[in-house]
Amino acid sequence: AKPVIVAIDGPSGTGKSSTSKAVAAQLGLSYLDTGAQYRAITWWMVTNGIDTADPSAIAAAAAKPDILSGTEPTAPTITVDGVDVSGPIREQDVTSKVSAVSAVPEVRARITDLQRAIAASAVTGIVVEGRDIGTTVLPDADLKIFLTASPEARAARRSGELKGADLHTTREALIKRDAADSSRKTSPLAKADDAVEVDTTDLTLQQVIECVVTLVEEKR
Ligand code: C5P
C-alpha cells in the first residue's frame, strides 16, 4: 500500500502529541514532532548566545545547527549536533523563546525542508504534528486533523504535565504563545480548509485517538 500521510495541527494543550504518538504506534506509522524541531533550533540559539529577540541574528545562524529527529512513536528523540536535547527543549526558557525563533522565515524554510524529507522517506506512512503541517508543509496530506479545546482545558492539561506550575501563569503563557503563533506572517497556526476539526474539550484522550484512527483507516 501507498504510505499514508497524516497532518495533525492545533494550538498547545489540545492533546496533539499524545494523540499523534498513539495513532502512529497503533497503525505502525512513523511520527514527527515538528514543535520539537523548533524547540531544538531555539535551544541551539540560546546555548550559543544568539539574541532571540533579534530576527536578523537568528536568520544568519539558522543554517548552522544539525538537527536530527527520531521518528519512533514510542520513544521520539531529537539531537542537535549529536547532543540529545529531548529533555532541555522542554524547559521554560526554551518554551518562552520558541515563538520568536519560529517566526523567522529562514528558520521556517530550513525546518520545513527537513520535515518534507522525513515525510517523503516514511515507508508505511507518518503522522506529523505541528501548527502549519496541513496548510504549508504537507498540503497534499491524505488526512488533515485540526485539534482544538477551550483555553481552560488546555491550561489544565499543560499544568498537569509541568509539575507544580500554577494554572493561571500557565494559561497566560499559553494564550500568549498561541497568539504569537497565529499572528506571525510566515505560515501561522491555522486550520486548513480541508482539515477535520475535532474539539477535544469534553473528550478523553482515548476517544480522540479512536476518532483519528477511524479517520485514518477510512483513507487507507
Ligand atoms: O508543539 P510545541 O508546543 O512543542 O511547539 C513549540 C512551538 O514551536 C510553537 O509554539 C510554535 O512557535 C512552534 N511551531 C511552529 N510550527 C510548527 C510546530 C511548532 O511554529 N509546525
Image (cartoon, rainbow, N blue to C red):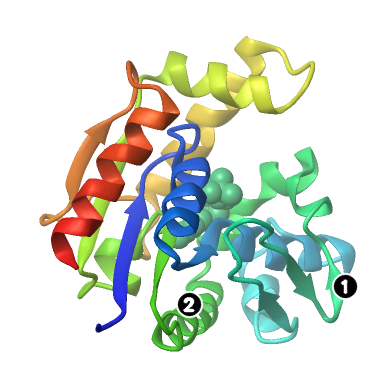
Residue 140 placement: quadrant? bottom left
Measured Cα–Cα span from mark 2 to mark 1 = 20 Å
Residue at 75% x, 81% y: name it: 65
Residue 152 placement: quadrant? top left
Residue at 45% x, 58% y: name it: 24
Q: Is disc 1 placed on a helix, strand or loop?
A: strand
Residue 178 placement: quadrant? top left
Q: Position of residue 48 (x, y in %)?
A: 88, 70
Residue 134: image tag: none
Label tally: 2
Q: Residue furthest left?
A: 194
Amino acid type, callout 2: Gln
Q: Position of residue 31 (x, y in %)?
A: 50, 64
- Characterize the local packing of mark 1: few (<14), some (14-19) or many (20 or more) Cα atoms within 10 angstroms: few
Q: Position of residue 159 (x, y in %)?
A: 65, 20
Ligand 1 under 8 Å from disc 2 Cβ: yes
Amino acid type, callout 1: Val
Residue at 40% x, 87% y: name it: 120
Q: Quadrant of the N terminus?
A: bottom left
Q: Is disc 2 placed on a helix, strand or loop?
A: helix
Residue at 32% x, 16% y: name it: 202
Q: Quadrant of the C terminus?
A: bottom left
Residue 145 placement, left or right of 177: left
Q: Position of residue 36 (x, y in %)?
A: 63, 59
In this rendering, is residue 200 above or below 12? above
Residue under label 2: 115
Residue 83: image tag: 1
In this rendering, is residue 114 above or below 99? below
Judging depth in this view, the residue of 161 and 185 nearest the camera is: 161
- Characterize the local packing of mark 2: few (<14), some (14-19) or many (20 or more) Cα atoms within 10 angstroms: many
